[in-house]
Image (cartoon, grey):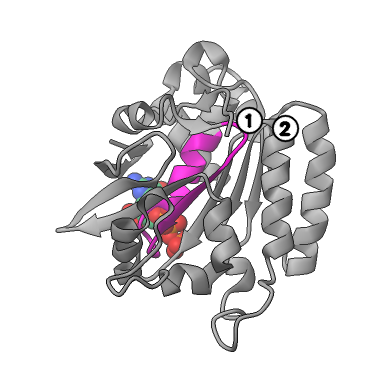
Amino acid sequence: EYLTGHLPTHLKGLDAALSGGIPFGALTELVGPAGIGKTQFCLKISVLATLPSCYGGLDGHVIYIDVESKFSSRRLIEIGLNSFPEIFHLEGMAKEMAGRITVLRPGSLSEFTESLQKIKVSLLQNQVKLLVVDSMAALVSGEYEQGPPRQHPLGWHISFIKSLAEFSRIPVVMTNQVRSRSATEISNYSFQGERRDDCGNFDSHLVAALGIHWAHAVTIRLVLESRSGKRFIKVAKSPMSPPLSFPFKITSSGILL
Ligand code: GTP
C-alpha cells in the first residue's frame, strides 16, 4: 500500500512507531473494552485535525459519525483549551474549531448507508481531513453473533469506507468495543494480520464482531487495554511497526502518553 502523509497523534512513542501518526488513505481501528478511552482518543485526534498546520494539525474539517451519542463538544473544547491554550483562548476560536467538526448520528444501518453516500460528496470538496466512526460494532451489535456464517451486514460499508479513505487520501479512524479479555487476546495474536488463537483458529471475538472481511480491510489496529490499573495502547497490526505498547493517561487535555 502506498501511504502518503500522517495525522500526528502527539503521542510521541506512538507517532514514532507509526512513522509519523495515523496514515492517510487507510483504515485505522481502535479496539478495546468499554471505558478504556476510545472516544477520548477520537476527540483528541479531531482537535488535532482542525488545528492550524503550524501547530502540527491538518487545518481541516472532520466528519464524526457518532453512533452511540458519545461525542461531546464540551469535552472537545476542554481538550482544545488545555492542550493548545494559545489557539483556543483566542476570541471566537473555540467555536470556530468546534464548528469544523460535523457530527452525524445515524440511528440505523440504512441511515448509516445514507450518511456514507453524503460523506462521499463532502470529501470531494477537499476540506475534510479526518473521518471518525465511533463505533462501528455498535451499528450491528448483537445482530451478527449468532447463527451460521453469512454475508456480514457491514460488508458493503467496510468496502465503501476503505474506498473513501483511498480516493480522498484522508485518515479514517474507527472504533470497536470488545470484552476486556478478548482485547488482550486480540493484542496478543493479531500482529501482522495473524488473527489466530492458541489453537490456531481465527480470533472468534473479532470475527464475530465484524467479520473476517473487516479484519483484512484494516491497515492499522491499535488495541487499548488495561493492565495492573494502567492503560496501554498497543500497535497490534501495522505494516511498519513491531507490536510496541505505550502507557497512556486520560487527563483534562485528553489522552496523553
Ligand atoms: P465505550 O464507548 O464505552 O466503549 O468506551 P470508550 O473506550 O470510548 O471510553 P471513553 O473514551 O468514553 O473513555 C472513558 C474514560 O475516559 C473514563 O473512564 C474517564 O476516565 C475518561 N474521561 C471521560 N471523560 C472525561 C473528562 O471529561 N475528563 C477526564 N479527565 N477524563 C474523562
Q: Is residue 97 magenta?
A: no
Q: Please report the residue visible at 39 percent of the width from the left and 27 percent of the height from the top.
A: 10
Q: Nearer the viewer, residue 188 or 117?
A: 188
- The image position of residue 80, as x and y in percent, is 48, 30
Residue hosting label 2: 168
Q: Magenta residues, as a range?
A: 24-46
Q: Is residue 247 left or right of residue 127?
A: left
Residue 181 is tagged as none
Q: Position of residue 2 (x, y in %)?
A: 59, 29
The furthest residue to the bottom: 147
Taking the image as four quarters, which one is ligand 1 found in? bottom left
Category of crowding for the residue at label 2, using alpha-carbon neighbours closer than 10 angstroms: few (below 14), some (14–19), many (at least 20):
some
Label ID, residue 95: 1
**Figure check: 243 above or below 23:** below
Q: CA distance from mark 2 to mark 1?
A: 26 Å
Q: x, y (%) of residue 254?
A: 39, 39
Residue at screen point 43% across, 53% down = 193
Label total for image:
2
Instruction: Give the structural element (helix, strand or loop) at label 2.
Output: helix
* Among the two numbered marks 2 and 1 on one chain, the one whose residue lies closer to the N terminus: 1
Quarter of the rendering containing residue 140: bottom right
**Quadrant of residue 245 within the rendered picture:** top left
